[in-house]
Amino acid sequence: MMSLLSGLHGHTLRRVRRLWLQYGVLWLGAVLVGLVAVMYAWLIDFGFSLFRAAQRDHVWLPLILTPAMSALCVWLTRRFFNGAEGSGIPQVIAALGEQGETRTKLAPKLLSLKIVAGKIGVSFLGILGGFTIGREGPTVQVGAAMMLYMRRFYPRPSVIMEKRLILAGAAAGLSAAFNTPLAGIVFAIEELSRSFEQRASGIVITTIIFAGVVALGLNGNYIYFGAITAGADSAGQAIVATVVCGLLMGAAGGVFCWLLLNTQKWIPAPIRILRAERPVVFGALCGLVVAVVGVVAGGVTYGSGYAEAKGLLMGHEQLSAFYPLAKMVSMVASYLPGIPGGIFAPSLSIGAGFGNLLHMVFGSTSLSMLIALAMVGYLAAVTQSPITAFVIVMEMINGHAFVIPLMATALLASRVSRFFAPPLYETLSERYAQPHH
């Protein structure tokens, strides 16, 4: 009898352990990614509200605060958190694409819990300084790093298992950040899987669902930018708007990518030397540019641009024709020093600004449609992942009425962008595969 009971007990334990390894680890990781994504969003919003309050009371304060914060962020990143700089998506692509001997070196370095702490902490300081950075790209790296850490619960984690965990965590991070689960799946397939043989798997979808449920539970069922209504535009107007937005946003986003990838061609030699030899001073200089642009623009270029984009979409924000160009300058100056921070939300904001600008020319076309098309066009041009851009914007504005124009604009803008520069994230990811990294 005793032997029978102990046998049943052993069988039950083995079954529980197998279920834990098969589902439990994954679900636990997904829940943690969702929690961290939401808390990170709250932290960034809190940081920017502090900056905004100080900036409204003291308009000139950013001229001192922003360069000082930039210098601090660059010093911290280079001294303690090498690998946390920028968006974080290139690091995830590099970790997924590594082969052979580099495999064991890159992923633990670029996707560690130390990097998670640095990414969250330093980007908080960056937004506290008013930088034009988003939290969505960093959440991708944070999600990937947290899921990779879960491999410790597996007795013999394989290379394929590690890559699946990275892929699932990154996709879950994006979906929880934007509250767009479908976009997380598409992003994993289109952007991250280019160099990864496991194109789509149940692991990715399961992780996204759990992270999404947590984000939903804490934030409620909100639409990132709110629902917009379709205007009474004719088919002809929609076609013209699609072509114009696709071509112009493709060119604008392509130029932005070219600027980030070809700094040696347009930054003057003395400043290039300063960037290489004294990065903290270069960071302070970039911070000064962000501050000056912000002061001249009346404060609208600070931060991710979420409020401005939402205000334009809802029709209760008035911005000048120069807003998208000023925001682009601020975004380039925020990215060049290597401060942790993403380009998704600022790209959407710049796109919204261009949509507003186009409405000044095409007055008879509905403003909300032009803004939605320009947003998807600019994001598609910057990321060169048109399906991800289309799904993100469609889910974020509840824009099912615009499905065909949104898709066409994204595809056209992405194609036009390729004339200016190769895919941004992939090209940046190649730098992590170099021996000196």
Image (tube, rainbow, N blue to C red):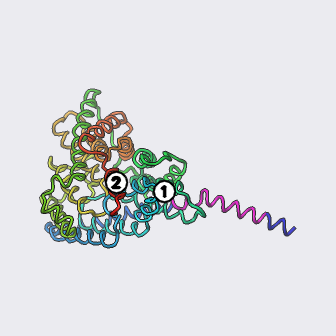
Residue type at the position of mark 2: Glu
Alpha carbon distance from label 1 to label 2: 29 Å
Residue 136 in sight from this viewpoint? no
Query: Marks 1 and 2: CB-CB under 8 Å?
Result: no
Task: Decide which of 96, 189 is in the foreground and name it.
Answer: 96
Is 231 placed left or right of 265 in the picture? right
Residue type at the position of mark 1: Ala
Q: What stretch is highlighted in magenta?
A: 8-30
Which residue lies at the image location 23% right of the left edge and 43% below the top edge?
A: 420
Indicate the position of residue 119 as horizontal and vertical percent values.
36, 65
Q: Does dot 2 land on a helix, a strand or a loop? A: helix
Q: Does dot 1 land on a helix, a strand or a loop? A: helix
Q: Mark 2 points at which residue?
A: 430
Q: How crowded is mark 1: few (under 14 residues within 10 Å), some or many (20 or more)?
A: many
Task: Decide which of 88, 56 is in the foreground and name it.
Answer: 88
Indicate the position of residue 121 as horizontal and vertical percent values.
34, 69
Q: Name the residue under label 1.
A: 211
Which residue lies at the image location 87% right of the left edge and 67% below the top edge?
A: 1
Q: Main secondary structure of the magenta part?
A: helix
